Amino acid sequence: MNDAKNTPDSASQPLDERVNNRSQRPSSDAFKAFMASNWAASNQELPPRDDVAGHAATRRKAISEQFKGERLVIPAGPPKVRSNDCDYRFRPHSGFAHLTGLGLDHEPDAVLILEPVAEGTGDGGGHHRATLYFRPLAGRDTERFYADSRSGEFWIGARPTLAEFEARLGLATAHIDELEAAITKNVGAPEIGGISIRLVRKVDENIDALVDTARYNTAKDPENLDLAVLDALDEKLTEALSELRLLKDEWEIDQMKIAVAATVEGFVEVVKALPRALTHTRGERVVEGAFFARAREVGNELGYDTIAASGNNATVLHWTRNTGKINAGELLLLDAGVEVDSLYTADVTRTLPANGAFSEVQRKVYEAVLDAADAGFAAAQPGTRFRDIHTAATTVLAERLAEWGLLPVSVEEAISPDGQQHRRWMPHGTSHHLGLDVHDCAQARRELYLDGVLTEGMVFTIEPGLYFKNEDLGIPEEYRGIGIRIEDDILMTSDGPVNLSAALPRKPDDVESWMAGIYREADDGGAS
């Protein structure tokens, strides 16, 4: 018998179905009936309200105040393909996470909609009613339970039900099958009784297309629809969501403290791993792995790709390849942060002597960077400008570079707008806001960010550095191959700045003592 005659023509199989060729899942009615039977009942008890729920409601009301009468669409985003049919771990868009309070990985494809209502009649006395649209857990009596590798419980574990999310968040919920109608109904120009939409774009291309189609179909003159005007509407919502995060509430500050504490633990693990890293051809990867293990153990993920840069690699600002060897006598620049389950992340940098002791030149450069960091901290006072932190820190660095004979002009000329020669060795900014994104609030207006006034509730970094590349022939050889950055996470209070990452030593003597203490404890088996 020729089996080929009984085999379906492979050319007739749709391309998007061929990924299932490896699964060999039975499709008989008997199998389906058996798979749907004899499962324990799901837990029907509703969970308590999340601590973040009230804070998220306050944030939604603040956005509602800015966009009365308009429908606001904030997608979480879809899963993102890593390779073929394998996805990256899902992380929702930060604006969605901020307004819902949801973190982790359980709401891909979800969308939050703020539906306009009569002024003052919405949630909490606002002007909108919020609804979370998502795909709930498939029942165990459905085929998706075992057949859907992206949403089936058999594959990815349990997901909350509509009722569970509503109980946790104090937020109305609806099945994602109702989403299209919720987005497109009554869309049109307000002057003819329609509703204007604002969308956080470039998060979910399917939602982008749905909104664009609705706008086109309801336009008076579709052929002359001004897309630039519509883009400006959407950009204003993205801007507002970013600016809303400039001031952290009490719950957010607690999450930042948790993230920083977890990051400190990760740095301890790195120091423990340094002896092995010094013997490995990819010592930087040993360091990266030690920190990542702690991030996954105590948090959700890394807040960003770890920079584990030794020797001359430390002069590469965003060195994330981490393929280098760590040599005794060199410095290790470690820039790393733990993202906790709420998705808030720390961002801390320390520069450590690989063998536990700074050389004379390393110490001199390190102390200059530390003095610059301290100057930035002193400048960060309530009522001063965000940009003042950078000015204070880089002025100190310019002064040190002049003292060492490296600056080709005077300090005054260098720090003037027409000079800036010191930026050859400190090319990046000294501070950025921090929170749900490592570079948080990035879409905020310049007048509220760079030119903004430091205010209670802001969380930001202070991170000056000096980077002397091996290839830099404009400096003496003794400096070449030294890259140093010190970065701390700062909370602004009414009484002044608080260093959230102060538990990690900063002074060179303290760094050496801290490292030696960790090695002693390891030698003693952790008994001390």
Image (spheres, rainbow, N blue to C red):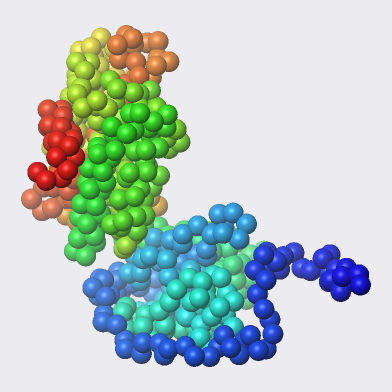
Q: In this view, does 427 lie above or below 231?
A: above
Residue 263 is situated, as x and y percent measured from the top left of the image, at 25, 48
Q: In which quarter of the image is residue 213?
A: bottom right
Q: From this viewpoint, which residue is outermost toward the front? A: 1
Residue 119 is situated, as x and y percent measured from the top left of the image, at 34, 82
Which residue is at the front of the view, 341 or 440?
341
Residue at 77 percent across and 68 percent down: it is: 14
Q: In this view, does 282 lie above or below 20?
A: above
Q: Is residue 454 visible to the viewer in this orientation of the structure?
A: no
The answer to whether 266 appears left or right of 492 in the picture is right
Q: Is residue 140 visible to the viewer in this orientation of the structure?
A: yes
Residue at 46 percent across and 59 percent down: it is: 89
Residue 353 is situated, as x and y percent measured from the top left of the image, at 24, 27
Q: How many marks can you see?
A: 0
Which residue is at the front of the view, 442 or 39?
39
Where's the N terminus, which quadrant? Answer: bottom right
The answer to whether 54 appears left or right of 182 in the picture is left
Q: Is residue 264 above or below residue 231?
A: above
Residue 316 is situated, as x and y percent measured from the top left of the image, at 40, 29
Where's the C terminus, which quadrant? Answer: top left
